[in-house]
Amino acid sequence: MFKRLWLLFAQVTTIALALLFVLATLRPDWLASDSPPSQAGGAFLPGIVPSQTTPTSSPNGDLPSFRQAAAKAMPAVVYVFSRQSRQSPQHPLFDDPLFRRFFGEPSDEEPRERSPRGSGLGSGVIVSSDGYVLTNHHVIEGADQVQVALSDGRRASARVVGTDPETDLAVLRIRLENLPIIEFGEPSALRVGDSVLAIGNPFGVGLTVTQGIVSALGRKQLNINTFENFIQTDAAINPGNSGGALVDTQGNLVGINTAIYSRDGGGNLGIGFAISADMAQQVMRSLIKSGKVSRGFIGVELQDVNSAMAERLSLPSAEGSIVASLQPGGPADKAGMKVGDVIVAVNQAPSRNTAELLSLVAALSPGDKANIEVLRNRQRTRLKLTVAERPQRD
């Protein structure tokens, strides 16, 4: 009797295992647990739930999607329309065949003269619930009237709170209720290869999102702005994107789109530049507080030290900034600096080139005391000076 029962049990178990194998092979979804699996696959550990990944999956489950980031950021990106009733000076970069602003300027085959009532189209980003909008200085430069249009169809006249030509940033303010706002991200957390989205109004066709990666970080000495800290991206950005948003995969603002590299003055070639959101925030706070950006100034004209100079002056390396001229009676002149001195540090912070030196000096407050280290006749000399305020550029 016992032997027959054991035989029956063995047969039932064998059949059950065979059915389980068939189901696991042909319809594994029937056996899926409601509990989240671990990343190791198969079993899961109690109390450990895998974190949500970004980007999310598309509806068919096989392609990455950035729809959540786009949906979060797009409502806060606006169109900026500017009009001017007088001729304004043309930005010198409009004639540069390599760098074109996203302002929708005519091509080389079209006339460049602006009409008596010129108009321009760019983009902007709403950054606060009380109506502050970040955009580019060149988008509203010389404008008598500025209007902002939201993606929900609302329009409003905008007041120019302040502009900073040296970073090509401007702050506008609009008066509307229930404004969508964008959250600031952390550009310092970006790494080359990270995915980013560019949002703006290219060629005036309407709000557009393009996707790419971070191609480079901390781009400087491009001679686009006086103070530069660009994020380079290959996300497709074109004329009309000026002042628009560069966002991370969470939909947070990491940059303000500003310029593209183009050989023929046309559209995107996969090299675009955005002002870091960290710099944009600093400039925005100053413009909101006082309508201008106060920066340090020591009254010198500089030139980068190259290899030939370093060899001629017997310098230890091709680093630093050589003083080409001094402002008479300026801070550096009063402190005893001389033409030919090579500035290598500000308050013990090393300065390897003119771009770094400008940033170090600009970060000082007018009236501050600063120690400037120079190389003179192969000797390191420290000069103490009182920082002045950098003159505002029109």
Image: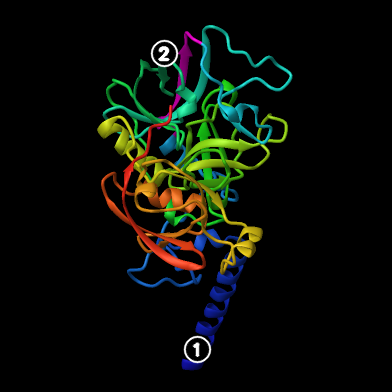
Tell me the tag on residue 99.
none
Q: Count residues near mark 1 (Cα–Cα under 10 Å), then give few for <14, some for 14-19, many for 20+.
A: few
Q: Position of residue 121 (x, y in %)?
A: 52, 20
Sooner in the amino-acid sequence: mark 1 or mark 2? 1
Q: Main secondary structure of the magenta part?
A: strand
Query: Element type at marker 2?
Result: loop
Quadrant position of residue 308: bottom right
Q: Residue at x 55, y 75 (%)?
A: 17
Determine whether label 1 and label 2 are within 8 Å by CB. Answer: no
Q: Position of residue 304 (x, y in %)?
A: 56, 52
Range of magenta residues: 74-86
Query: Element type at marker 1?
Result: helix
Quick check: 51 above or below 183?
below
Q: Give me the C-alpha separation between circle 1 and circle 2.
A: 95 Å
Residue 57 visible at all: no
| Residue ID for mark 2 | 144
| Residue ID for mark 1 | 6
Residue 169 horizontal side relative to residue 216, left or right: left
Q: Which is in the foreground here, disc 1 or disc 2?
A: 2
Which is nearer the eye, 230 or 52? Answer: 230
Q: Amino acid at mark 1?
A: Trp
Quick check: 157 above or below 348?
above
Could you tell me which quadrant the C terminus lies in?
top left
Q: Position of residue 78 (x, y in %)?
A: 44, 26
Quadrant position of residue 347: bottom left
**In the rendered structure, does residue 83 fall within the stretch colored magenta?**
yes
Quick check: 379 above or below 211?
below
Which is nearer the eye, 328 or 48? Answer: 328
Q: Residue at x 32, y 69 (%)?
A: 47
